[in-house]
Amino acid sequence: MATLSRPVRSPTLPDPIRAAIFDMDGTLLDTEAAQHRAFEDTGEALGCPVPAEILKSMVGVNRDANEIMLADRMGPDFPLARFYADSDALFEAAVNAGLPLRPGAQLILDHFRDTGVPLALCTSTIGGKAQERLEQAGLLHYFEVVVTRSDVTNAKPHPEPYLLAARLLGVDPADCVAVEDSYAGVRSATAAGIATVMVPDLLPATEEQTLITAQVLPSLTALRDLLLTATAA
């Protein structure tokens, strides 16, 4: 059975940054809130509302793990298959209506592109869906590497996804920066030995994230500004 590496504190960003690895949902795409609403509305419609603390624990976690958790915490009478079928339909309708970007997403991707820093994407979404969403949002062309749930044995919070992304880029993890919004994502990236910036979405940074990340910032625009300031110094 695979074991998780203990997160390593990364108090500073590497200088220079030789590669940047981004999470997708909740970091670049404003999809976590839509997924949260779909889960919430579906539970209510089925007469099996999912408590807020359970919904929060699902953020940034792959579906396989969430299914196990829901079955355990909601009990044997919870209609798991119907819950996912109905919530998927609601979520896909929201996605098809338009995929808004998180504030500053275009700015930070343009910054790395313009400074010649190669980019990878590291997501818990399965392969086909991840590529489709990136293309729909007009972001796919930014990334030299896309690592999805389909590409790894161990999903976030295990370090495997980030280690694979760094290896495919040909860059030492210590020379990379990761950008994440979720607890599972932060744990994955820091366990891979990558200096990590957390830009919270649905979940605020806790003491754990504050301790193990290089920075907790309010937006991707703030990250771009920080990098510009460091370059000018």
Image (cartoon, rainbow, N blue to C red):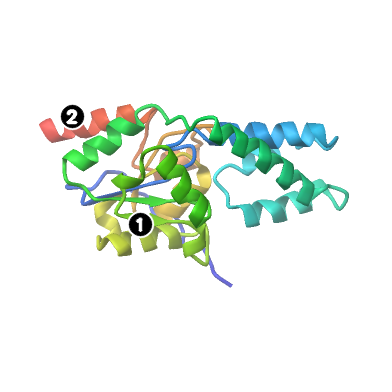
In three-dimensional space, the C-alpha distance between marks 1 and 2, rounded to whole angstroms, equals 24 Å
- Please state if 130 lies on the left or on the right of 105 as rendered: right
Q: Residue furthest right?
A: 77
Q: Is residue 92 above or below residue 168?
A: above
Q: Nearer the viewer, residue 7 or 156?
A: 156
Q: Residue at x 17, y 47 (%)?
A: 16
Could you say which is closer to the camera, residue 145 or residue 209? Answer: 145
Quadrant of residue 42 within the rendered picture: top right
Does the CB distance between marks 1 and 2 fall below 8 Å?
A: no
In the displayed structure image, the side of residue 130 where residue 62 appears, left or right: right
Q: Position of residue 95 (x, y in %)?
A: 55, 35
Going by the numbered disc 2, the residue's amino acid type is: Thr
* Mark 1 crowdedness (10 Å alpha carbons): few <14, some 14-19, many ≥20: many
Q: Position of residue 154 (x, y in %)?
A: 52, 64
Q: Quick one: quadrant of the C terminus? A: top left
Kind of element beneath mark 2: helix
Q: Nearer the viewer, residue 86 or 71?
A: 86
- The residue where tag 2 is placed is 229
Q: Residue furthest bottom?
A: 1
The picture places residue 158, in percent across and down from the top left corner, at: 50, 59
Vertical order, 135 against 167 (above or below): above
Residue at screen point 16% across, 41% down: 115
**What label does residue 93 carry, if any?**
none
Q: Residues within 10 Å of mark 2 (few under 14, many from 20)?
A: few
Residue at point 79% right, 32% down? 44
User: Mark 1 is on which residue type?
Assistant: Gly
Residue, disc 1: 193
Q: Does residue 27 appear anywhere in the picture?
A: yes
Q: Position of residue 10 (x, y in %)?
A: 33, 48
Closer to the N terminus: mark 1 or mark 2? 1
Q: Secondary structure at mark 1?
A: loop
Q: Is residue 219 above or below residue 132?
A: above
